[in-house]
Image: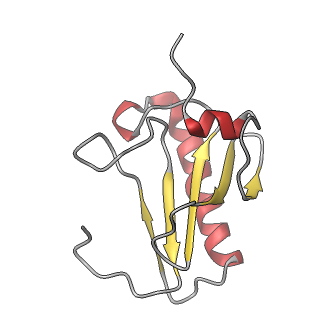
């Protein structure tokens, strides 16, 4: 059996996280190494490795995640704008093999990133 990712351990409540949203499909919590004044990670409870491994059956779940991100941005008063990032694979900067979206805001976010 593969070792649990840190995100799976957070989902299973084996390690603590500053959770700001949870429902039956996903979890959102504050990033431990924030890159902006608001830096939230939104993860599905279903174990999906990355955007590179999603399946057609994940379509509804992915839509749900995006709606949660929009709601969190509203709740966190990110009316001036925000960035949503999903790093995919090693070259994409993904460091945890569990699909996750970064929600960043409350500061100007330059382009191009990285």
Quarter where residue 111 is shown = bottom left
Foreground pick, 113 / 9: 9
Residue that appears at 27% across and 49% down: 92
In this rendering, the answer to whether 93 lies above or below 114 is above
Q: Is residue 110 left or right of residue 75?
A: left
Q: Is residue 64 left or right of residue 52?
A: right
In this rendering, the answer to whether 17 lies above or below 76 is above
Q: Is residue 99 left or right of residue 64?
A: left
The spot of residue 24 in percent (x, y) is: 77, 40
Residue that appears at 42% across and 33% down: 54
Which quarter of the rendered picture does the C terminus lie within? bottom left
Foreground pick, 55 / 11: 11
Residue that appears at 27% across and 41% down: 90
Residue extending farthest to the top is 1
Which quarter of the rendered picture does the N terminus lie within? top right
The spot of residue 107 in percent (x, y) is: 46, 87
The spot of residue 2 in percent (x, y) is: 51, 16
Residue that appears at 44% across and 32% down: 49
Quarter where residue 46 is shown = top right
Describe the colour scheme in one phrase: secondary structure
In this rendering, the answer to whether 109 lies above or below 59 is below
The spot of residue 17 in percent (x, y) is: 70, 52
In this rendering, the answer to whether 97 lies above or below 39 is above
Quarter where residue 68 is shown = bottom right
């Amino acid at each position: 059996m593969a070792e649990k990712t840190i995100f799976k351990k957070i989902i299973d409540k084996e390690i603590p996280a500053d959770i700001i949203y949870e429902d039956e499909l996903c979890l959102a919590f504050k990033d431990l190494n924030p890159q902006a004044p608001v830096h939230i990670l939104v993860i599905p409870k279903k174990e999906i490795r990355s955007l590179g491994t999603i399946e057609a059956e994940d379509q509804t779940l992915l839509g749900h995640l995006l709606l949660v991100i929009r709601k969190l941005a509203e709740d966190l008063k990110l009316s001036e704008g925000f960035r949503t990032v999903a790093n995919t694979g090693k070259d994409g900067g993904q460091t945890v093999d569990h699909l996750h979206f970064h929600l960043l805001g409350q500061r100007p976010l330059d382009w191009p990133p990285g």
